[in-house]
Every structure is written in C-alpha cells, then in structure tokens.
Image: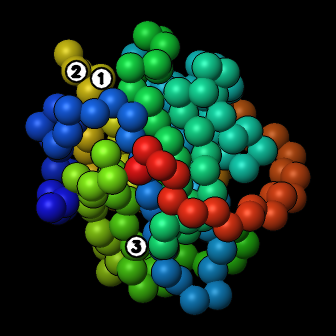
C-alpha cells in the first residue's frame, strides 16, 4: 500500500522499497490547461550544473540513461524511470516539476499527484489540488535527494514566473522553445 505524503513530508527510499529501479508518475487534471512535466538533475548546490540532466520532451534521457522520460502511461500524465544506483555522483537531487504551457494558474488544478512505484507496487504518493496554490505557473512537485542515502520529499512549492522562473531558480538558462513531439501511448513498462 502506498504511503501518503503531505507537503513537506520526507522519507528514506530504503524505508519505502529495497528497489533502486523506480517509476515516477505524475498526473494533473486541470480542464483547459496543458503541462510540461520535467526532471532537473541538480548538483550539491541545488543547481543545474550540467544541462544534460534537465530531462524534458526535447531531451528524454540523461547520458547514462539513469533518468528517462517515458511519456503518458498507466493513468499518468507523464512518467519517468529513475535508476538510483546509476545516477552519477555529481547529481545529488532530482526535482520533478510541472509548468503550465500557455495561459493559466496552478490554482485551476482540480487534482494531481506524484507517485513512486517500485516492483509494480506504488510505495509513495503526494496528492495536491489547486487550493494549495494561487497565481503560480510552475510547481516543484517532489524530489529525490541524496543525504547519506536517497530520500523522497513531497515539495509542492510554486513559482509565479513559470518555466523561466524555475530554470533561473536552478541556475539554468532559458532557451527558445521548440514544439513538443507527439508522444505515443504505451503500456506500463515491465519494471513498474
């Protein structure tokens, strides 16, 4: 049974599962809104010191494939595969984020969650809705972070400026946008 998290709750991954090959699913229901869901691989200073660890639709995997964008599946708006024991030592935090593509505010979200699945079983879930936000256009949903061992934290912190503000928060630079390619629907992967 999944452990329910509230904003600010943290747990050791080893307390949730013995596995290191994890599925991270994000689902957001907000009629009329479209979201870009990404993962930022951050260094010890919580900065995006290597752009190859900004995982999004135009860059769906890290160089060694320890972080992979899988697309919409298993009821999730977006999903990722994270292999914790393959993440390079310089990456100390994985921040999963959602930004509104176009007009809108996070307060319009009817419901949403970030969940962690290991060995086919959901082990953690942080559910949220628009009542937790106001004018924000981007939100940090949850993080995996290294503090003597990998841990999970439910974040729920919003940014008014959207993706630009999020990128600047992590020390990244804003580039010109390109349209996202269409993502095919696929069944849940065998490891999830």
Callout 1 environment at 10 Å: few (<14), some (14 to 19), or many (20+)?
A: some
Q: Is residue 178 left or right of residue 1?
A: right
Callout 3 environment at 10 Å: few (<14), some (14 to 19), or many (20+)?
A: some
- Say which residue label 1 marks: 146
Residue drawn where x is 28% and y is 33% of the image: 19
- Using the image, determine if residue 1 lies above or below residue 192: below
Q: Which mark is residue 149?
A: 2
Give percent across and percent down for residue 182. Answer: 81, 64
Secondary structure beneath disc 1? strand
Give percent across and percent down for residue 17. Answer: 20, 39
Q: To which quarter of the image does residue 114 belong?
A: bottom left
- Using the image, determine if residue 11 lies above or below residue 3: above
Q: What is the spatial separation of the Cα atoms under label 1 and label 3, in whole angstroms?
A: 25 Å
Secondary structure beneath disc 3? strand
* Residue most extreme to the bottom: 31
Q: To which quarter of the image does residue 99 belong?
A: bottom right
- Using the image, determine if residue 61 lies above or below residue 87: below
- Image color mode: rainbow
Q: Is residue 75 left or right of residue 13?
A: right
Q: Which mark is residue 10?
A: none
Q: What is the spatial separation of the Cα atoms under label 2 and label 1, in whole angstroms?
A: 5 Å
* Residue most extreme to the left: 15
Residue drawn where x is 69% and y is 41% of the image: 60
- Say which residue label 3 marks: 112
Q: Are marks 2 and 1 in contact (CB under 8 Å)?
A: yes
Q: Can the viewer see residue 54?
A: yes
Residue drawn where x is 61% and y is 46% of the image: 69
- Looking at the image, tell me whether mark 1 or mark 3 is earlier in sequence order: 3
- Using the image, determine if residue 54 lies above or below residue 38: above
């Amino acid at each position: 049974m999944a452990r329910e998290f509230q904003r600010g709750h943290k747990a050791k991954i080893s307390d949730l599962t013995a596995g290191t090959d994890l599925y991270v699913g994000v689902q957001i229901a907000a009629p009329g809104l479209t979201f870009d869901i990404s993962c930022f691989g951050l260094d010890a200073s919580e900065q995006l010191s290597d752009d190859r660890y900004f995982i999004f639709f135009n860059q769906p995997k890290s160089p060694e494939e320890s972080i992979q964008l899988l697309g919409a599946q298993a009821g999730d708006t977006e999903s990722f595969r994270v292999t914790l024991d393959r993440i390079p030592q310089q990456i100390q935090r994985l921040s999963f984020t959602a930004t509104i593509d176009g007009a809108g505010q996070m307060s319009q979200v009817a419901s949403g969650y970030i969940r962690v699945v290991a060995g086919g079983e959901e082990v953690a879930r942080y559910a949220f809705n628009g009542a937790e936000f106001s004018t924000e256009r981007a939100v940090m949903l949850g993080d995996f972070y290294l503090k003597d061992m990998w841990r999970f934290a439910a974040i729920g912190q919003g940014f008014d400026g959207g993706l630009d503000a999020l990128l600047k928060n992590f020390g990244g630079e804003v580039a010109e946008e390109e349209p996202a390619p269409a993502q095919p629907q696929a069944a849940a992967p065998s490891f999830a």
